[in-house]
Every structure is written in C-alpha cells, then in structure tokens.
Image (cartoon, rainbow, N blue to C red):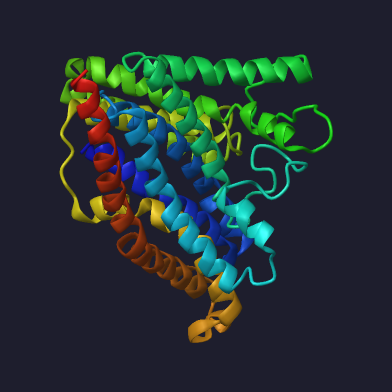
Amino acid sequence: MYYGIHYLRGIAALMVVMHHCAKYLPENIRTPVFGGAASGVDIFFMISGFIIVVATQNMKANTPLKFIGRRVFRIYPALIFCMLVGFATIYADKSWIDLGRAIVPLPIDYSLDAPAFGYNLMGPAWTLTYEIMFYSFFCLAMTINHKHRALIAAALMSAQCVAIQLYFNGAFSFSAYTQLHIGEPSAINSYLKNASSPMFFEFIYGMVIAELFVRYKHLVTKQVGIALFLIGASVYLWLYASQSTPGFGITYFGMWSAFLFAGVCFYQAGSNPPQLKSLVFLGNISYSIYISHYVTMGIMDMHNPFGFAQASQAVQFALVLLTCIVAGTLVHFIVEKPFIRFGKLVTERSVRPAEIAAAGR
C-alpha cells in the first residue's frame, strides 16, 4: 500500500464532508475556511487515475472482466444502500424514476450548468458519473493493449472531449464549466455533455503521474521527495487560503490539487511514509463517508436527534461531522467491505475457467 496516497484519499473525502457540514456555520467562517474543501473532489479524480494505473500493472491479475467486476462491487453496493436509506427517509417524496436515475448514477438535470448538471439526488454522487465513464475508457484501453492502457485511455478521453467541443462549440476550453451548445435534451445529448467535460483531464493527470511514478520513483531521494512535497503542499495551501480560482476542474480546484497531489507522490517515491493507523482507517472508509454523508445530514435535519437544531452552530457542525464519520464507518464495515470481498471472490471464480480453457488451446 502506498500510504501517502491512501492518506490523501481519506483526507480528500473528509474535506468534502466538512465542506458540506460547514453549511451550519456562519458565512464569515464557512467560505474562507471550508469553501476550498470542495477541492477534495478534484483530488479524488487524480487519485483515481493514479490508483487504477498502479493497481492494474499485472496483466494476468487484471483482465477486463476482473476489472469491471471489482469496480461494480466497489461502487454500487454502498451507493444503492445509501440511496435506499435516503428513499425511505429524506427522499420519500421522490419517484422510482428519480431513484433509478440517482443510482445509475445520473445528474438531476442536464439542462443545468456543467460539470455537475444540478448534482445528483444524493449530492456528491454526481462525481461517480465521471468515475464510471473513466473506468469504461480504461477498461477498453486494457482490452486494446494492456501495456499502453494509460496512454490509450488518455488519448481516447482527450480526443472525445476535444472533438465534441469543437464539433458543437467550434472551440475547445479546459474550463469544466464550458456549456455544450447542443440540441434538445435526449439520452445521447446528455452523454455528450458529460463526455465533453474537461473533468476527465484530472484522471489523465493522475495517470501521467502514475506512469512517471512507476518508472522513475527510484530516482527520487528522501530529501528531494520531502522538499517537493513541502513545495506542493505550500502552493496548495496558499491557493486555498487566497480562494484563487474556486470551482471544479483542471483550471480551478484542479490546479490547486495538482500541486498537492504531485507533492504527495514525490514524497511517496522518496520515502516510505509511516503507517499511521488513524489515517489508514480514514483512507479505508473514505468512499463510504463520501457517499453516505449527504443522506446522514438530511436525516439529522429531518429528525433533529439530541436537540440538534437547537444547538449552537459550532456544536451542530461538530455533531453532524462526527455522525457522518460514524455512519460512514458503519456503511464501510456492513456494506462496502463485505461486497468488495464478495466481488473479488466472484471475479476470480468467473474468470478462472476461461483462463484454464484458453491455456489448454
């Protein structure tokens, strides 16, 4: 395990949770302190690009079928569970169609502004639309040529994004808020709006860093790794504090995150970060707290446990943050972790007969 990357994943998830929990705080604290915490989304995308490349180095252990199976069991059980809990509580007035769209997952309304298009019914689940599209392209790239999977995936996503924007807009922009000038809403037009998003360049950035990491990490000394980490973290914190270019995408939060992410990767390459149990645990539950916290917050707002609504703003923030972490931990151990294990078991058993048959030819 690359502990530095794992810790960053947990911290990024916690940042997003804190960004949303900050709604209970006064404006003069919420925006300057927690406004930039939404950049955890952009960090997540870069980590996804990195992890997918590093985790699929072994071709025999990472066939396309295994890759798809593991991703499905990694994402959907916790997503479906949280959505069903939400449907039984805070989303009880929504239709089954709304529930189905959210689980796919699809944004609320593609006529709204990019890149979130109104977000998902369950808030931050809008990012999974991009994650799943990225996994699809990466799986296709693995099928074409495993050795050059990152290059092929990057080329496919880049070409798709640039070509669609040029065709419909007559120009290309790296801004994730670029609106595609397209016709009436339809399934294909909705896909094209997602597919043309420069958000994919954050996955590409993560993949590029991963390829460089795998090839050249032995050249990075401990001193150089620490120095570059401090530089990257300092630039990120300076941009965060100055609230420079707030917003999703490679030209906004992604620019901040690129410095921090590269710095962490340099530190990981030059050192062997110590195993800190609390941060390992936070990394382990990162997806569960990310995907469950919106529903947890909604339930607390609806049912007012412990006199939550009557507490001070600071107490509300602390209480809802703690509850989101506890709820995410439960989702991790009850749903996410068992299904990850089950997914590995299913993919191993389903792929092995095909591998044996192929070897016998």
**Residue placed at 55% from the left, 39% from the top?**
242
Q: Locate residue 59 relative to residue 28 in the image: left or right.
A: left
Q: Locate residue 245 relative to residue 111 in the image: left or right.
A: left
Nearer-the-camera pick, 299 or 251:
299
**Residue placed at 35% from the left, 49% from the top?**
10
Q: Is residue 180 above or below residue 149?
A: below
Instruction: Assign the C terminus to one quadrant of the image.
Output: top left
Instruction: Assign the N terminus to one quadrant of the image.
Output: top left
**Residue placed at 33% from the left, 65% from the top?**
334
Q: Is residue 111 above or below residue 299?
A: above
Q: How far from the left and from the top, in percent, is residue 64?
A: 36, 29
Q: Locate residue 50 relative to residue 179 in the image: left or right.
A: left
Nearer-the-camera pick, 123 or 195:
195
Callout count: 0
Nearer-the-camera pick, 96 or 302:
96
Q: Is residue 232 visible?
A: no
Q: Locate residue 352 relative to residue 192 in the image: left or right.
A: left
Residue that lies at the very extreme toward the bottom in this rendered image? 307
**Residue placed at 26% from the left, 24% from the top?**
57
Q: How far from the left and from the top, in percent, is residue 211?
A: 32, 18
Q: How far from the left and from the top, in percent, is residue 340?
A: 31, 50
Q: Is residue 122 above or below residue 85?
A: above
Residue that lies at the very extreme toward the front in this rendered image? 361
The quarter of the displayed image where residue 290 is located: bottom left
Q: Is residue 44 above or below residue 288?
A: above
